Image (spheres, rainbow, N blue to C red):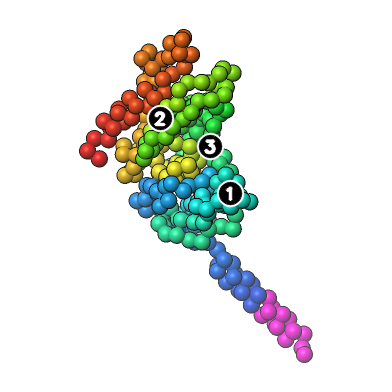
Amino acid sequence: MALTTIVACLTAMGVGETVQASETKKETAVVKKYPPYPDVWEWVTPYPTRMSYRFQAEMRPDGDVQLSFQLKGQSPKPTEDVFPRGEEHSFLFFSKRSIAPPKDIQASHNKRRVILPNGKIVMILGTSGGSGNCFREFDRSLAVRDHNEQELSHKMLFYVLGSPETFVPSGMCEGMPYDDPPFSYRIVTMLADLIPLQDNTFLVVDYVHGVVIRFDEQWQSKSSLLNRRVFVMGEQEVQTFIRNEKYLNTEAEGYGLRWQSVDGDLYQYLMTLKGGK
């Protein structure tokens, strides 16, 4: 075979391989679907009584957010822990459809500080869970700061439970015996992760109650849950409310706060915000 023919064949083979590689790359490339984002501002679990801490929210390459969770099992097995594991589910927030869950749903919740595209910082402050035997339902808040860490807003997000729960004081709280009478409550601060979005909105992912709400940096949202099940209040406003003298225990009562009275009055106040919704 002539030298020119061999060179031509090799060149053709190289071009073919390049074209094939290019086509393969196109096939594997992920098409960016979002943004722009559709008018979706909330997600609520279909299984509110069976949510566990095994809940993860992850940004997908196409810009959607995948919510994956494992329910508490309904029938405990001897080999399982106190919350036996049930079935797994996965849902796309913006596409609003179910998909196959990942092989392993992580229970790590560490998305407590995120940076929006405009440089502003959204962060969760306070305890991420229980702290000894103390009642910590009013210890969590969220703040928006500028790129210099100057606070722009400081809010508390309250979730109203469907029915009251009971807290039984016991043991020690902050080095003091905690032997107050049991009390019931209906208001909790949201225990959540944060997911930043490209339009400077963000998701608050409450993995305890299975609720996701999208906010902008001004704490505005089109979620139907707002002022119905979820309420936003200024942190200073809340502190002023609960530090009213009428909620303070006497020395004989062991100081601290009368949490049931705080909860009851705050619940009534939030219901006035609910209005006609």
Outermost residue, top direction? 251
Judged from the image, the secondary structure of the residue bearing numbered disc 3 is loop
At 39% from the left and 25% from the top, the residue drawn is 260
The amino acid type of the residue labelled 2 equals Ser
- Residue stretch in magenta: 1-14
Residue at which label 2 appears: 184
Give how far across and how far down residue 20 sits, in percent.
Answer: 61, 74
Which image quadrant for residue 144?
top left
Which image quadrant for residue 166?
top left
Disc with the residue nearer the chain's start (3 vs 1):
1
Residue at which label 3 appears: 112
The numbered mark at residue 106 is 1
Q: Tell me if 139 is positioned left or right of 80 in this view.
A: left
Q: Nearer the viewer, mark 3 or mark 1?
A: 1
Give how far across and how far down residue 202 sits, in percent.
Answer: 44, 42
Q: Toward the viewer: 114 or 243?
A: 243
Judged from the image, the secondary structure of the residue bearing numbered disc 1 is loop
Label 2 to label 1, Cα distance in Å? 32 Å
Q: Is residue 143 magenta?
A: no
Q: Nearer the viewer, mark 2 or mark 1?
A: 2
At 37% from the left and 38% from the top, the residue drawn is 163
Outermost residue, left direction? 276
Q: Quadrant of the C terminus?
A: top left
